Image (cartoon, helix red, strand yellow):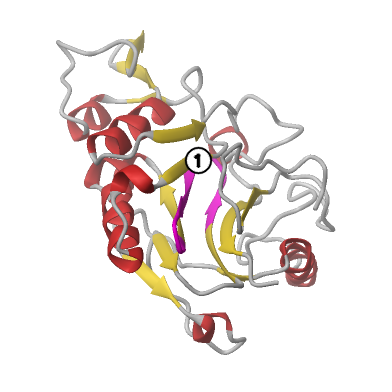
């Protein structure tokens, strides 16, 4: 794996996990260089080379989703990693099969990886999915698949837009049960007229803790602040996508 990529600091024997940065691939600007998503304007051959390199680096078969900022969770099997397998429209996945990597593709939204006894999961958590319950749905699906309790799950927050750059309007406050007249400044900090800076990692921790997950790490990187290391849609508009992935080691 590229030395610049991120990895959870959790204690999960037999489980692999990583998040790519924009470094280590083949794409040309503005997708330089490890863009892992096709259909953005990048050379498809470069994207394919990046995806092949990524799969080889992790030693597992990544299954990418068609993410729609929703709450649907799919359970993956080896069939989903086949070259001709249909792409699921969902924002989270779980698996109990070794060698299959659950993934989240991001460029500001928060990727959340989960490790449990006998299973793993990944979720794509932008503010819409987060406010509607994508993390709660993922925890429930992982508990069901592995017959574990939320307290047995470890969660890791990858790189997403940070609390100094995520400007939002009142609609986002309301989605999380806050109001323009009464806000918790550790979650929504007043920034400009009718604008606030949202703390997406803190909001994700709130949701996970309320669901009973206690072992939560990560969430300290801001995609928008570090242009040399991370893609950021809000910062650049035309840009690539990074991937966070987690898998049961089948080797």
Residue 186 image position (x, y, % from top left):
34, 13
Disc tally is: 1
Residue 107 appearing in the image: yes
Q: Is residue 109 visible?
A: no
Residue at x 57%, y 72% (from the top left corner):
98
Is the residue 20 above or below the residue 217 in the image? below
Question: 241 and 100: which one is in front?
Answer: 100
Region in magenta: 104-119
Which residue extends farthest bottom? 84
Q: Nearer the viewer, residue 173 or 59?
A: 59
Which quadrant: the C terminus?
bottom right
Where residue 96 sits in the image (x, y, percent)?
A: 45, 70
Identify the residue under disc 1: 156
Q: Look at the picture and state if 162 lies above or below 189.
A: below
Query: Residue drawn at (33%, 55%), measured in percent from left and top?
Result: 138
Q: Along the line of sight, which residue is nearer the eye, 14 or 115?
A: 14
Q: Main secondary structure of the magenta part?
A: strand
Identify the secondary structure beneath mark 1: strand
Residue 100 belongs to the span the image colors magenta:
no
Residue at 50% x, 22% y: name it.
165
Does residue 192 sit above or below 7 in this rendering? above
Specify whether residue 111 is painted magenta.
yes
Q: Is residue 42 left or right of residue 219?
A: right
- Disc 1 packing (10 Å; few <14; some 14–19; many ≥20): many
Residue 3, given in percent of the width and then of the height, sits at 82, 42
Residue at horizontal 31 percent and vertical 10 percent from the top: 185
Where is residue 175? Give x, y as percent.
20, 35
């Amino acid at each position: 794996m590229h030395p610049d990529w991120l990895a959870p600091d959790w204690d999960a024997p037999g489980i692999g996990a990583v998040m790519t940065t924009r470094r280590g691939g083949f794409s040309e600007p503005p997708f330089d260089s490890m863009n892992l998503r096709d259909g953005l304007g990048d050379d498809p051959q470069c994207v394919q080379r990046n995806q092949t390199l990524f799969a080889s680096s992790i030693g597992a078969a990544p299954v990418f989703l068609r993410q729609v900022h929703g709450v649907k969770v799919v359970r993956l099997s080896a069939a989903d990693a086949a070259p001709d397998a249909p792409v699921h429209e969902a924002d989270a996945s779980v698996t109990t099969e070794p060698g299959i990597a659950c993934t989240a593709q991001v460029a500001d939204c928060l990727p959340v990886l989960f490790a449990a006894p006998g299973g793993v999961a990944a979720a794509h958590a932008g503010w819409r999915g987060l406010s509607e319950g994508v993390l709660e749905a993922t925890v429930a699906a992982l508990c069901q698949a592995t017959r574990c309790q939320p307290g047995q799950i470890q969660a890791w927050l990858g790189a997403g837009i940070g609390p100094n750059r995520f400007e939002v309007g009142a609609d986002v406050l309301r989605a999380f049960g806050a109001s323009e007249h009464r806000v918790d400044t550790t979650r929504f900090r007043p920034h400009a007229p009718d604008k606030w800076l949202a703390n997406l990692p803190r909001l994700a921790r709130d949701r996970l803790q309320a669901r009973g997950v206690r072992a939560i790490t990560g969430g300290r990187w801001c995609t928008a602040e570090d242009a040399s290391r991370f893609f950021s849609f809000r910062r650049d508009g035309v840009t690539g996508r990074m991937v966070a992935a987690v898998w049961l080691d089948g080797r």
